[in-house]
Image: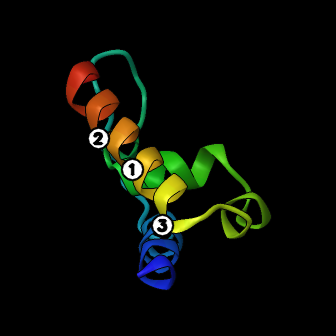
Amino acid sequence: MKDLILKNIKDSLDIKSTARNSMGCSESYYNPDYLIGKCFTEKELDALSETELNNLIRLAEFASNAFY
């Protein structure tokens, strides 16, 4: 499962959105996987446990919803 989480994060970084919100920020930041991938390096993410990655996803989902 950890490998799938890391793959989803990495894959999200390959999708470039040109859409911008009213503040001029990329709409990509509303994607929790993208948000995590931009915040942490691949090496940092690899060092995390599956539980830690799931907690990051939970936090990023909450933030994405709160700021949308």
Q: Position of residue 11 (x, y in %)?
A: 46, 75
Query: In the picture shown, does residue 28 fall above or below 15?
Result: above
- Tell which residue pokes out farthest to the top in this image: 23
Secondary element at image label 2: helix
> At label 3, which amino acid type do we have?
Ile
Where is mark 3, residue-wise? 9
Q: Residues within 10 Å of mark 2 (few under 14, many from 20)?
A: some
Specify which label sits upstream in the sequence, 1 or 3. Answer: 3
Q: Position of residue 47 (x, y in %)?
A: 74, 65
Q: Position of residue 67 (x, y in %)?
A: 28, 20
The total of numbered circles placed on residues is 3
Q: Is residue 45 left or right of residue 26?
A: right
Q: Residues within 10 Å of mark 1 (few under 14, many from 20)?
A: some
Quadrant where the C terminus sits is top left
Where is mark 1, residue-wise? 57
Q: Is residue 9 left or right of residue 19?
A: right
Question: Are the residues tagged 2 and 1 within 8 Å (C-beta)?
Answer: yes
Q: Position of residue 21 (x, y in %)?
A: 29, 27
Residue under the point 52% across and 74% down: 6
Where is mark 2, residue-wise? 61
- Give the CA distance from mark 1 to mark 3: 10 Å
Specify which label sits upstream in the sequence, 3 or 2. Answer: 3
> At label 1, which amino acid type do we have?
Ile
Q: Residues within 10 Å of mark 3 (few under 14, many from 20)?
A: many
Quarter of image, res 42: bottom right
Secondary element at image label 3: helix
- Give the CA distance from mark 3 to mark 2: 13 Å
Residue under the point 69% across and 70% down: 46
- Tell which residue pokes out farthest to the right in this image: 43
> At label 2, which amino acid type do we have?
Glu
